[in-house]
Image (cartoon, rainbow, N blue to C red):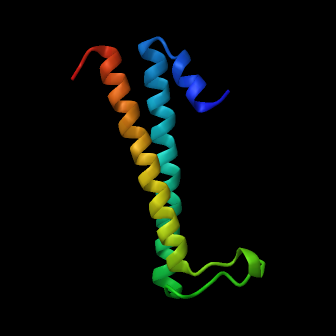
Amino acid sequence: MAHDEYLVKMKTPEQFLGHLGEEAAEVIVELALLQKAIGKTVRFGPNSVNPSLPAEQQERNIDWVLRQMDAVEREVSDVLLAIKRLRTRLGYP
């Protein structure tokens, strides 16, 4: 089921709360990946690449950090939207 179709079918507070939980879990995953990218960048330097990856998949550590920062921002936006929807559904401002 597409994400938008899922949102349309949500009716109960429990469904909205479940959706918020799913979105929060996605933030945690992306934050863990960001932490991993930061750790490798600090340890090996911003211009280092992972030599065990095929050449076409290699990226500089700093590019990995930036990509993960973007992913975290997207997921946080999704969580904030889920919070807003749950509050609206529950009748809170």
Residue at 47% in and 70% down: 66
Q: How many marks?
A: 0
Residue at 38% in and 35% down: 81
| Above or below, comparing residue 87 to residue 68 in the picture | above
Quarter of the image containing the N terminus?
top right
The image position of residue 80, as x and y in percent, is 35, 38
Q: Which residue is outermost to the right? A: 54
Instruction: Using the rendered view, name the quadrant where residue 9 is placed.
Output: top right
| Viewer-proximal residue among 82 and 36 | 82
| Above or below, comparing residue 53 to residue 25 in the picture | below
The answer to whether residue 88 is left or right of residue 35 is left
The answer to whether residue 54 is left or right of residue 71 is right
| Viewer-proximal residue among 8 and 10 | 8
The image position of residue 29, as x and y in percent, is 53, 51
The answer to whether residue 6 is left or right of residue 52 is left
Q: Which residue is outermost to the left? A: 93
The image position of residue 48, as x and y in percent, is 58, 87
Residue at 31% in and 20% down: 88
The image position of residue 17, as x and y in percent, is 43, 23
Residue at 45% in and 82% down: 42
Quarter of the image containing the C terminus?
top left
| Above or below, comparing residue 1 to residue 71 in the picture | above
| Viewer-proximal residue among 29 and 83 | 83
Q: Which residue is outermost to the top? A: 12
